[in-house]
Amino acid sequence: MLSAALLGLILLAGPAWAQEVAPAATQEAAPAAAQQPSPSASPVAETRVWHHALSLLGTPKYPDGFKHFDYVNPDAPKGGLLRLSYDGTFDSLNDIITRGTPVVGLQLIYDTLMAPSSDEVATEYGLLAEAVSYPADFASVTYRLRPEAKWHDGQPVTAEDVVWSFEQLTKNNPRQAYYYSHVKSAAVTGEREVTFTFDQAGNRELPQIVGQIRVMPKHWWTGTDSNGKPRDISQTTLEIPLGSGPYKIKQVVPGRTIAFERVPDYWGRDLPVNVGTNNFNEQRYEYFRDSTVELEAFKGDQYDFRVETSAKDWATAYDFPAVKQGKVILEEFANRASGQMQAFIPNLRREKFQDQRVRRALNLALDFDGMNRTLFFGQYKRTSSYFQNTELASSGLPQGKELEILESVKDKVPASVFTTPYTNPEGWSEGLRRSNLREAANLLRQAGFEIKSGKLVNAKGEPFTLEILIANPAFERVALFYKPGLERLGITVTVRQVDTSQYINRLRARDYDMIIAGWSQSLSPGNEQRDFWGSDAADREGSGNYAGIKDPGIDALIEKVIYAKDRGELVAATHALDRALLAHDYVVPSWNYPNTRTARWNRFGRPDKLPEYSFGFPDIWWWDAQKAAQTGGGQ
């Protein structure tokens, strides 16, 4: 399960994804499985049992009435300006639609029904909702809103707002519509109660992901602007929207800057999920169109914090006076919360990539060892799982419950999943690299291609061309390093760099041969897997199925993941799904790094013990006036 917030635009690299870490993907739902039980006839009529939290892994850590999360400083001071950066540009303050380029940070002005804990997996506690109820068969869920919840204009947040938000979200965003496609209805069932009814039972994740829905003010969006013109949530806008969250928008410079100011009388400031959080008086994002300029701006103290995803820059670009003086802190944080498949992704919607032998040949042509040594200072390891660096990654040969699951779909998955563990080609010597290219050439011949006049052509004499589409300039050197190996096979390769808007539009339209991108995975995978790999998502504009995968075996294994009854079964089903995805050679896996590399100007405090699954910046950090005085500048 990924946060619903990730269902918007994760098509492009932001600060945490830019440069060598590709954009992740998003989420969810699929055709109603005939074998699943029918939903309850009348879930609303049942005697409800109310809960303060939801968890997919058993009993939530924090009991009803808890004061705050263990990992926060409940007495954290409020104040200061936090300056951040972002890549690209923006032209809209409406990020639920698939038009335009939305601004970063809008989650700060809105609330959701539930809020996650950062020291638990797949567990959420009440935010807008004071309580949640669901029947034993998970066929529906009811949320009861807090009476004190209000918008920034003082009006109450209502059950009607929740229903309207859900309707607009699923109407105007194809990805969200797909993610919530198993929600049959959303209805007001009490003064402060909203019930979501599902079209199937047994999907344990659905009640929880409904709690991630962003709630927006119906009265504002259906009203008129300062010019008397009716607002339209289906269109882009630069009018500052109304929210209910801990921040509101202070300033907008289209395409360049957005600033959020803390709401001092925020209705939810004393809730257990909010104590010790949202500590900065202002959070400001400055946009940069060039990553080199962005890095130099950080060195020049034009913003405070960056995630460094370039191995080259991490190794060479931080030897400047402020680091030596202790004014800039370099720190790595272990990434325990997610796994990721980052890869060169061919578009299977194009005929030339539909043969698995062709896709394997593309993998054999990648000299990862040389790339790692030459470009990345040996910092990376080759990715070999769609759930890399987690317990969900498959390994060895299937055993136990995983084997049972694979046997149940034996006629739909490659035979190799039972006999051959997945491995990437090794290329640490010249002899191995030449052997890889020979094997690749042989596979291409078997697939019906041949060399004519130095060019690889198909049976019709059409040349094999490959355009690698990128938006971030830092990926250019990566694509150019890959290019010679492909050209030695006779493939005509073009590296095409486009601007952010064009890149987004081409991804939405599936207008590419190959991209460098990825899928981020939570520790509790579920409905989002349909969006990543499901057949229904392959032809749906804006889905996370970048590769265009359509395979009945993959579809069947996705359902095994979603309907797992406990953690052990979920892990086994995910291993099986991972193994099958790898066996098809859908992508050319690239690299991974287990830590998040960060650099910050030394102006901030943080709790002594950070949560297990996040380093919590900026949510639980705060402005430290004493450190700021010693560091100088910054404000």
Image (spheres, grey):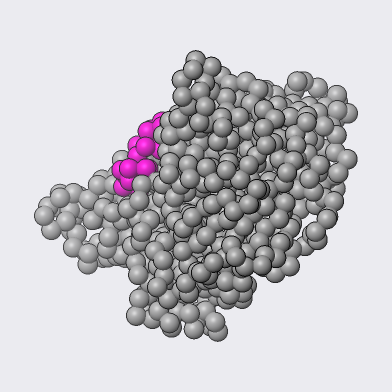
**Relative to 391, does residue 3 appear above or below in the rendering?**
above
The C terminus lies in which quarter of the figure?
Answer: top right
| Left or right placement of residue 411 versus residue 601 in this view | left
In front of the other: 529 or 414: 529
- 118 and 309: which is toward the camera: 118
Q: Quadrant of residue 424 in the image?
A: bottom left
Residue at 85%, 51% in the rendered image: 67
Residue 505 belongs to the span the image colors magenta: yes
Residue 207 position in % (x across, y down)? 59, 60
**Looking at the rendering, in which quadrant would you find the N terminus?**
bottom right
Q: Residue furthest top?
A: 227
In the rendered structure, the answer to whether residue 466 lies left or right of residue 70 reads left
Q: Does 588 appear above or below 83?
A: below
Number of marks: 0
- Quarter of the image where one finds residue 353: bottom left
Q: Residue at x 80, y 61 (%)?
A: 63
Residue stretch rendered in magenta on the structure: 496-514
Question: For the point 22% across and 64% down, which residue is it?
Answer: 447
Location of residue 341 in the rendering, given as x and y in whole percent from the top left corner = 50, 56
Mark yes or no: residue 620 visible.
Answer: no
Residue at left offset 52%, top offset 31%: 221
Is 252 located above or below residue 440 in the figure?
Answer: above
Q: Position of residue 137 (x, y in %)?
A: 57, 71
